[in-house]
């Protein structure tokens, strides 16, 4: 069976160059980097070389990059590190968006259980968090604002630089989870102005289980993992050398790629939409602007959140095993449980039940797009008409 992998927002395949550069660190170069003998010290330069690649990718200084186990750890480190200090319970007020990834929303709920007040700012119908709404939510005791850079479901790119400027006017720290935007649009920590930024390796063709956290120079953040003085005392734990090397290589590849790869992502996504919309009457898209220029600036080039009419998205994908994709709502016993994003943009449940997220990547082929679209169209037609796929 030919498989169309259209779920790159969930995870990307490991780039061959990344897998290759990691291999020696599983075998010959296996030492503990903290050891003083040659098997340890020979790894130090390699790790710092990888850190430089991550820093260059983010527009940061090397001493502002801490390696982590992934996006969830990075996000937890920021939220808990800002509010929980070993000297005292800092308390205060946290602002997040209404559709943050669980790696933000759940730590926020944990902090809330400890007495920290949390405000969840809504979004408009295009999935945009308005900076003025964030401004209205700020209080004298607000310590941190955390808004994702790009929504993982509909691809809406947020006005982080504007939000950061508003917050810094009141000496409030800002964090953004950039897991979905990195490698798809330009991301520079200096341009965004943020104090913290999260990177997840498995979204940018590096392995699962590795990530990084940007911490702006001069900003104090309490450690999440206490132990030895690894990572300049920011994050304890023996260095995961092969994975850190892999992440550095993935960042190097994307740093050296020109804007053409972004245009290629957009072309594949737009071809997918063209094929689906031509064949399925009533198909709608979440978060797409009528003006192409605005759409390019406000929506990830690889992400297509479509609403298939008259079907349930989960059933559509179940009946199309040749296509790997994700739904935006879960339907059980006649009820539709919508994602926070679809709820936030005000999508009606009868529309949301047919939502499917399709996301292409650098390795997605035109054949995958064409055949994936054809398979989805065939299944949708069969479900709507009640005829088995292939019947004339």
Image (cartoon, helix red, strand yellow):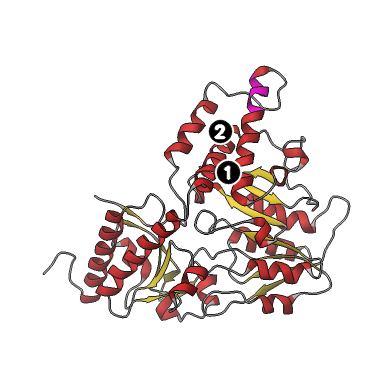
Q: Residues within 10 Å of mark 1 (few under 14, many from 20)?
A: many
Above or below, 193 relative to 349? above
Where on the picture, by quarter, is residue 28?
top right
Residue 157 appears at what percent x and percent y?
A: 55, 67
Is tag 2's residue or tag 1's residue first in the polypeptide sequence? 1
| Residue 363 seen by the camera | yes
The numbered mark at residue 30 is none
**Tags 2 and 1 touching, CB below 8 Å:** no
Residue 345 appears at what percent x and percent y?
A: 52, 78
Seen at 65% across and 51% down, the residue is: 74
Above or below, 11 relative to 290? above
| Residue 359 seen by the camera | no
Where, quadrant-wise, is the C terminus in this rendering? bottom left
Q: Residues within 10 Å of mark 2 (few under 14, many from 20)?
A: many
* Secondary structure type for disc 2: helix
188 or 208, which is in the foreground? 188
Magenta region: which residues? 39-44
On whether residue 25 falls in the magenta region, the answer is no
The numbered mark at residue 210 is 1
Q: Which residue is mark 2?
A: 242
């Amino acid at each position: 069976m030919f498989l169309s992998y259209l779920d790159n927002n969930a995870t990307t395949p490991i780039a061959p160059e990344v897998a290759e550069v990691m291999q020696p660190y599983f075998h010959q170069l296996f030492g503990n980097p903290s050891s003083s003998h040659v098997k340890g010290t020979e790894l130090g330069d390699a790790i710092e070389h990888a850190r430089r690649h991550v820093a260059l990718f983010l527009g940061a200084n090397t001493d502002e990059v801490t390696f982590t186990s992934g996006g969830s750890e990075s996000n937890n480190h920021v939220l808990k590190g800002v509010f929980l200090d070993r000297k005292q319970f800092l308390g205060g007020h946290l602002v997040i968006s209404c559709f943050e990834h669980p790696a933000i929303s759940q730590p926020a709920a944990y902090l809330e259980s400890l007495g920290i007040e949390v405000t969840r700012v809504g979004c408009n119908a295009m999935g945009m968090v308005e900076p003025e709404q964030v401004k209205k939510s700020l209080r004298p005791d607000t310590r941190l604002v955390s808004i994702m850079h790009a929504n993982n479901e509909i691809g809406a790119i947020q006005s982080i630089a504007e939000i950061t400027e508003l917050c810094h006017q009141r000496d409030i720290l800002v964090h953004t989870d950039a897991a979905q935007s990195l490698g798809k649009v330009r991301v520079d920590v200096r341009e965004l102005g943020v104090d913290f930024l999260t990177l997840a390796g498995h979204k940018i063709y590096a392995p699962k289980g590795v990530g990084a956290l940007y911490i702006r120079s001069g900003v104090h953040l309490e450690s999440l993992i206490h132990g030895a003085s690894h990572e300049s005392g920011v994050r304890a734990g023996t260095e995961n050398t092969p994975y850190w090397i892999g992440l550095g290589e993935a960042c190097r590849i994307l740093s050296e790629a020109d804007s053409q790869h972004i245009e290629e992502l957009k072309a594949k996504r737009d071809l997918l939409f063209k094929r689906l919309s031509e064949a399925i009457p009533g198909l709608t898209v979440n978060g797409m602007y009528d003006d192409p220029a605005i759409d390019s600036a406000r929506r990830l080039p690889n992400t297509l959140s479509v609403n298939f009419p008259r079907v349930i998205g989960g059933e559509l994908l179940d009946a199309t095993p040749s296509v790997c994709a994700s739904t935006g709502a879960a339907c059980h016993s006649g009820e539709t449980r919508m994602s926070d994003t679809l709820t936030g943009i005000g999508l009606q449940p009868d529309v949301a039940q047919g939502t499917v997220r399709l996301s292409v990547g650098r390795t997605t082929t035109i054949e995958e797009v064409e055949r994936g679209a054809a398979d989805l169209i065939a299944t949708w037609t069969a479900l709507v008409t009640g005829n088995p796929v292939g019947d004339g």
